[in-house]
Image: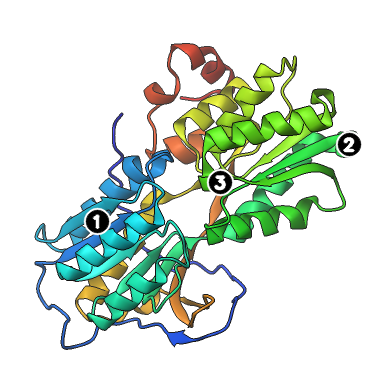
Amino acid sequence: MRRAAVAVAATAMAVTLAACGSAKESGGGTKSSDSAKTGDDLKIGLLLPENQTARYEKFDKPLIEAKVKELTNGKGQIVYANAKQDATTQNQQADTMITNKVDALIVDSVDSKAIAASVKKAKQAGIPVVAFDRLAEGPIDSYVSFDNEEVGHVQGKALLEALGDKAKSGDIVMMNGAVTDPNAALFKKGAHAELDGKVNIGKEYDTKEWKPENANANMEGALSALGKDKVIGVYSANDGMAGGIITALKAAGLSKLPPVTGQDAELAGVQRILAGEQYMSVYKSYPQEDAIAAEMAVKLAKGQDLGSLAPKKLDSPTTQGVPSNIVPVVSLTKANINDTVIKDKIYTVAEICTANYKAACDAAGVK
């Protein structure tokens, strides 16, 4: 599969997030002058949480690598590790990078609390830390992500739109993400704000490790408890779990699948949307988020101020006033595939419209 190589300028996003938690430690924003580098010969550590979600290996890693190269005249390098959903492994990976004296760390945490000890070690070693996609605890220096509560709002609104006047004619199932991921709580909060009082929530799950097989098992349990004919819709927090959910719905023998939400605009998710098996996903511009993360890391490694690159100040449960950049999100349906993932060169038409989906692509005008 072709890797996207999109260089997107980091722009200030006027998106408001409510601050959460109380301050115990103060985040930075510039690297300490005694450890900052002035040249381009930088080593940036990149710690990603898992490899089951397609975005990390397909988009985030290569795009961050490319942006770091661009910003350092080809001299900077990425030191990469993937924790494969194990928080202990990720802490070990971070500690190794700290020992090997990387100039900055970009961390997408498996467990936002568990990573705090390694973030402290980095701070003590004069290594700035960019919290990427998930708001890690500890004295982080900056944060870039999407408007995660808005993701839940977008998903909830879409599900209500799909249900229309049948919203209370049966039960919906809510399949939330992992409790170790702070973003999952924000997705859930936004979705509940839209759905509560407007639908009957028959079953709700926090899905361990975001795994599709766990979502599949949860969905089988929900169908058994509620009755397959009573389930009129499914809130799924991401596309991977949506795949597991849809497999369970098909196995139950449903003649018509209820609307299922998603997130991440994974290739399989986009194809399911075209086929009418999944109602929607949430498209998030990974190239934009990745470019911002890379630029933050390079600036911090050089001791430079982030300035307009971090127009917001957000609080984590441990750190107050973290310089942040929040990227907006888009609801992805059949109607706007051309204007999102194809326009931004996330996928080609050939990748999406394989033989099994060509007729669906033609019907949706995907070209």
Circle 2: residue type: Asp
Image quarter in which the N terminus is found: top left
Question: Disc number at residue 67?
Answer: 1
Circle 3: residue type: Lys
Q: SS for tag 3?
A: helix
Going from N to C along the chain, the mark reached first, 3 or 2, is 2
Label 1 crowd bin: few (<14), some (14–19), many (20+), radius 10 Å? many
Q: SS for tag 2?
A: helix
Q: Residue at x 66, y 17 (%)?
A: 251
Residue 304, given in percent of the width and then of the height, sits at 25, 80
Q: Is residue 21 above or below residue 93?
A: below
- Kindly indicate the quadrant of the structure image that contains residue 184: bottom right
Residue that label 2 marks: 165
Residue 141, given in percent of the width and then of the height, sits at 36, 77
Q: Is there a contact, CB below 8 Å, between mark 1 and mark 2? A: no
Going from N to C along the chain, the mark reached first, 1 or 2, is 1
Circle 1: residue type: Lys
Residue 256, given in percent of the width and then of the height, sits at 74, 18
- Give the CA separation, mark 3 to mark 1: 33 Å
Q: SS for tag 1?
A: helix
Q: Is residue 336 visible?
A: no
Q: Residue at x 64, y 24 (%)?
A: 248
- Give the CA separation, mark 1 to mark 2: 47 Å
Residue that label 3 marks: 208
Q: Is residue 343 left or right of residue 89?
A: right
**Camera-nearest label, 3 or 1:** 3
The residue sitting at the front extreme is: 88
Q: Nearer the viewer, residue 169 or 308?
A: 169
Q: Nearer the viewer, residue 118 or 23?
A: 118
